Amino acid sequence: MKHKVVVRSTLKDIRNFTNIPELRKGVIEEAPETPVNGNFAVNSTANFLHPSVQYLKIKQVAEINRNTRAYIFEPNTARGTAKLAYFRPGQCISITLQVGNAIVTRPYTLCSSPLRSVDDEYMIIVSKKPDGFASQFIVNNWRKGTEITASAPFGNFHYQPLRDSKSIVAVCDYQGISAFLSMAESIADKTLNADLTLIYSARKQNEAIMSQRLDELAETTANFRVIYVFSDEHVFKCERGFVTKSLIEKYAPISKYSLFVCGSNTLYNRIIPQIAELKLENKFIRFGLNGQIDNPENLSDFPPEAIGKTFLCKVIKNGKFSKTVPCSSTESLLVALEREGIETPSLCRSGECGFCRAKLLKGNVFIPSGIDMRRLADSSHGIIHPCCSFPMSDMTLVIN
Amino acid sequence: MTHKNNYDIIVIGAGCGGLSAAVCAAKEGKKVLLLERHNTPGGFSTSFVRGRFEFETSLHELCRFSTEAGLGELRQIFDFMGISDKIKWSPVPDAFRLLSKSYDGSPIDVTMPFGQDNFINTMEEYVPGSKESMTRLFMLGDEIEAAIEYFASNEIKISLKEIHNIMKKYGNFVKTAPYSVNEVLDALKVPQKAREIFNAYWWYLGIDCDRLSFTHYICMVNSYIRLGSVIPTYRSHEMSMALAGALEDYNGEIRYNSHVSRILFKDGEACGVVMKNGEKIDCNHIICNCSPTTVYSKMMKKSDVPLSAVKRTNARTFGARGACVYLGLNRSPEELGIKDYSFFITDTADSASQFALMKTIDTNSSQATVCLNIANPDCSPEGTTIMCMTTLYTDNCWADVTPEGYFDEKDMLAARLIAKFEEATGITIHKYIEEIEVATPVTFARYTNTPQGCIYGYLGDDWDSVVPRFMTEALDCDTKGLRFCGGWGTQLSGINSAVASGRNAAYATLGDIENERSAQNEA
């Protein structure tokens, strides 16, 4: 010891040191004997905003057209959901469906305002697609009173005041209308403070679902307007053609704006080259979820030799062998698991949220390069997102 | 469904403490099951992806870890586990930049380097006349680190003879251990302005230097300045994945999305757990990485909780609650003008006054901010920058935020921290935000289930700091078959503390198992 430190005096310092245990015991001895409290408001808020599950009931069904329904949900209090979780306009809920033996999930964007969730209502729109496994089931089976199991609201496709311009130009087709309807409703009821110009693309007028409501909102809301663009027919006061660079520029403000795009892959494919021409900064362009990839073989990087092949996937769940599942190279692993009725977590089905995170113990998969949103260390440790991974060999998969 | 004693040890929670406990026990040949409610390992030590950015969730820099094998306690533990070389490390270039206000109202803007001599010399430039006391302070730091290393494997016994022996070898440890940082700095006559700079690291422990244990603080600061610090190149998620990988290599088992709802007891001894889905798993040895508050209030029958545990838990207060603003910027650090990795930006350099300002949401814009690219240049695409601003709340102020007001409150918090950073540094960042995510105490409560969104466990108050906890550790183990580790354990929070406490909990449990076996053999 090169130098001696004294804080009070040597004697006092040593006495204080030897007293340390007694001091602590003394404070504990003084403490109340009431049972330990584990209920905290912050944790209740967390559970309220992000419940592990929401039990819902259909309060009302509205027929929008032959193939499309709007469903209004209320909390299913009998199953234990007392209140609906609040959300940001543009967010989704994932719905779990049992279709025959299969257990599948589908994300649907809430199209109502968050303000209505305070009054116990969520609304979603479902359009029956010709080959839509889940959408067919929903439109054919859901009635008033049907009980629904859903996730908490999730997703990053929403207005963020510190990142986005307050002026939003949105482009959608009918498949992406829910996000912008929710935003327009929220601008109208003042839960959202932004200016929205919606460019709604459709083939014909009758395909532009919810236009009546949008027109009403545009009529009564100063900072919301809607422009329709029809490719297959002329309609008075509407644009004819597709959404192009010059069309966006025609309706965009002169000042900076954020461009929000949500809809089908057809819309995305058509609009991406147009957006590139606009020369906007990346930060001013936001896309909605890609959605499930149904035909990976059409992607340029899909290994051609794998087309038409089927492999076997050995599934380990909760530490035990569960089942061996046949899976086609052109179908995501998640779909293969769901078809066999294996309960496995999933939310966005677009590769983004990572909720379906699983470990590939053996075998190979194809992950389309543009949608690999895995963490770096996950990629190097054999972690995959089954919702956007396609089998390329027999394999062993650990799910949770 | 019940599993009969398939496991020697069940670990609840795969945070750093739980992972460490599970790896150590499995490496010693025990059959270990690690149960985690979330779908990733690591607890706070993870990452998330937004757009073209992968954000670090929590880690600013690792303490007690050197890029050189065998140097630093954390490094030694990782070496022992065999994971040090499986992780890519990025060294942190400098200690910190402090932007604050001195007691006399003058602004503080100092950048402090690693290396004891460098630190002392730089301090002398900023605060002439500080050199002698700073030199003594770091010598003291070396002594105390050595003492702590000794006592980590030797119980401190309070007897006249023992004290005499300890005094001979570790006298300065004994004489400073009862005191706060500021009490000892007073005794060493460290000039006020040097003290303000030296105390900047109090952020990492979340208690002001009027109460913060000198022993705890000097060990941390000395380790940083002596060894420097590092971060895992692929975020702390890489470290968590390496720990989870090591567990599997040692034949341990880890299950995600596996929420333990109850711990079962029979005749006062732990005998198993029940999962949220109803599955029951028998096991006589449970190590909890979650908070004792949660365990005693939610996971045990009231009659199973010993009175001593009730009183101990009620005596404690919670440490800091955390909030973070994660920014992906569409300019490079050079274009923005950012040169430093770690910033401490406060309204006052007096930690007790700052601590008071952090009790309410509106009055708190102070921050510990990191620019990841400075230590890890390839962490984001060319022409972009990743930043993370962390603040602490020293009271339960987020309890008053309603779910409907929550999103606005988050955005206001982010705006407040960004404005403060710009004002303090003169660097513009708000125009360049391409991705932003905000985590609040509510977010941390959601992902880790921690009470009130606390990120630092129980407050290391003077009576409940690391030395008192160590000296009375045996009393804290008052439930047979149940031990704790992680940020809520004996060693307080921080990755190095959590990992060390996990190792200690594992070996203590191995001891319990050994004792039971010899008792059975005798019978």
Image (cartoon, coloured by chain):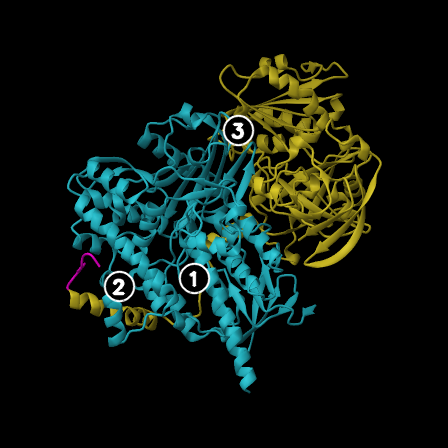
Chain colours: A yellow, B cyan
Please give left or right for residue A36 compared with residue B137 in the image.
right
Q: Which residue is label 1 attached to?
A: B489
Image vertical order of residue B215 relative to residue A16, above or below: above
Q: Position of residue B224 (x, y in %)?
A: 35, 47
What element does badge 2 sit on? helix
For this orientation, the residue located farthest to the right is: A308
Image vertical order of residue A354 relative to residue A371, above or below: below
Q: Is residue A4 magenta?
A: yes
Separation of marks 3 and 2 at Cα, in angstroms: 51 Å
Using the rendered image of the protein, determine whether residue A209 is visible from the camera's viewpoint: no
Q: Quadrant of the N terminus of chain B?
A: bottom right
Q: Which residue is label 3 attached to?
A: B381
Q: Earlier in the sequence, mark 1 or mark 3?
A: 3
Q: Which residues are magenta?
A: A1-9
Circle 2 packing at 10 Å, graded few (<14), some (14-19), many (20+), is: some
Identify which residue, A346 or A223, lies in the foreground: A346
Separation of marks 1 and 3 at Cα, in angstroms: 39 Å
Q: Position of residue A111 (x, y in %)?
A: 64, 36
What element does badge 3 sit on? loop
Amino acid type shown at disc 3:
Pro
Image vertical order of residue B324 relative to residue B64, above or below: above
Q: Chain of mark 3?
A: B
Q: Earlier in the sequence, mark 1 or mark 2?
A: 2
